Amino acid sequence: RSLAYASDMSEERVLYGMDAESHAKLMAKMDPESVQKAIEWIIEITGEPLQDLYPGLKNGVQLCKLLNKIKPGTVKKFSLNPNHVLVQRENVQAYLNGCAALGVPNQELFTISDLQEGKSIPSVLTNIYALGRIAQVTPGFDGPRLGVKYTLTLEEQEKRNKKKAEEALKKFKMAEIVGKAMQSRRDDLEREKKIEALTDRRTNEERVLKRKLVKGRLTEKEFQQCIDKINAQYEKDVANPEQAQIDIGSVVFGMDYEHQKKMKEKMDQEDNFLAAESIMDWLEEMTEDPIDDLHKNLRTGVVLCKLINKLRPGYIKKIDTRAYTSLRFGPSVSRDNIKLYLEACERMGVPRSELFTISDLYDAKDIAAVMKNLEAVRRMSAITLKAPALVTVSEPELLKKPLTTTTTTTTTTLEGTVSEPQLPQVEVLPEPAPPPSPEKEAQQVVVVQEQVTQVVEMEQPVVTVIDQPHELVIEVPQIVPVEEVMAPKEEEPTKKKSNFTRNLALGVAAGLLIGAGIYYVAVKKPDLPRRVFDKVLGFFGRAEDEVSARS
């Protein structure tokens, strides 16, 4: 157990472990030769005996006399016989104030506890040497010198301090000018963004009105009245954009500004407008709700949840419609609905790259991502088919007479409904020619007398009937259940192999790091285990002392 003793008022305080080492390092700065020179310097100036810095200077009397010898009248009032600790602290504080008045830098002063409680005697020594340096340039002092020769007078110090203050003031004024320029640029950008937002709002409102007119939800007269009202409000807002009631969000600069600009240009393209119209038409058809604006109509998340339940009945069991009516719960309810929709999309198998965040829709941060997601959902709403499977009917009697047949196929849609589309009639030719000889049969691959293929729409399967010499082959597509489509694919052996290689590499890297750490502790920091052990022992030692004191 490593120990060190520090004076604490009239008692001795025992230090353990790290505290003891820290105290030892601090006391190592106390060069005995430097301490002796400082003591001799104080004795020579004051003419009074002094054994040690602590506790000889503890009451502050000799320090105040030292200042008055260097420059008379520095400490005007102090106690010569301080019998109480508070009076001693007042003397030390008077000394510190005098040092600051003579020009000793703040970083070379000490606290009262450093001297009164003996917490940092090296700081006291540093202050005495700083005082000796200042005493060399103090007018009227011709006493002994302490430390290196110092020729910088107080006037020169004042000049330097004045120059530093002027430089600081110059930097402050420059920063003020730059700040004003940035604020002016910010105001200009805010004005431009407001005018741009007003223009976008007018354009979007015109598009919404045109869609309502095309869908028959507005008459020509109502349409023209709304257009005139929008134009009048736009001209009023553009004339005084500072008072326009519109939310522009946060003003961004640099790369963020360029990114916003590119996103806006991408959304303003005509192709995106047509894609948005197509998506809104599809949403109206699926949910039977009027959709005129993607952001405003989808912001509550209700339409999206209805869409999921249309494609997968019962996926979202409860849709909160308070988003339409409640001003208090509207934002939180809308975000919850959007979250339910996104979770349902993940369960359906929509890739993560085709999902969006809640803020992308609710705050209109990235409507393009919302459109991309809806396109993916629309693709998944189509019928999913596997490659055609061959169904062989080996009935010789079917080939002995002409055959006319009608094929009915059952189709399973993603919604779980079953439809039975009627395909057109497929006629098979009359009785085929007699089979070839065995010699020719070995060389003949397949002789197809006639092949009739009827391809129906995407929602219906493809049926192919082939009349061959010996058998009737009907090619029927196989319907894939939804569970099989959504099931994750099995990992390939190469992927398992790559995972094994990656895990092996990670294990080797972890072993190297652990070995490097052990080598560092063993070679570079051999005393670290001992210090940790001392810290643990110190903790238990203090606990034992506390138990003894309590008992």
Image (cartoon, helix red, strand yellow):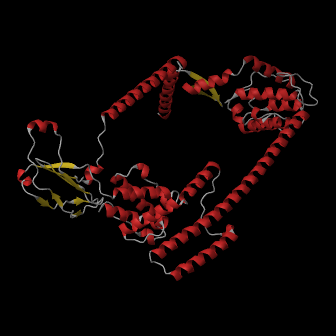
Where residue 231 sits in the image (x, y, percent)?
Answer: 62, 74
Q: Is residue 305 above or below residue 510?
A: below
Where residue 454 sits in the image (x, y, percent)?
Answer: 24, 58
- 155 or 546: nearer the eye? 155
Q: Residue at x 70, y 71 (%)?
A: 239
Q: Is residue 488 left or right of residue 353?
A: left
- 436 or 165: nearer the eye? 436
Q: Is residue 393 above or below residue 535?
A: below
- 404 or 65: nearer the eye? 404
Q: Is residue 224 above or below residue 402?
A: below
The part of the image, by quadrant, that contains residue 283 is: bottom left
Q: Is residue 160 left or right of residue 210?
A: right
Residue projecting furthest to the bottom? 221
Q: Residue at x 36, y 66 (%)?
A: 286
Q: Residue at x 89, y 29 (%)?
A: 137
Where residue 377 sits in the image (x, y, percent)?
Answer: 38, 57
Q: Is residue 317 visible?
A: no
The part of the image, by quadrant, that contains residue 419 is: bottom left
Q: Is residue 255 visible?
A: yes
Where residue 207 sits in the image (x, y, percent)?
Answer: 52, 69
Count of residue discs: 0
- 488 or 537: nearer the eye? 488
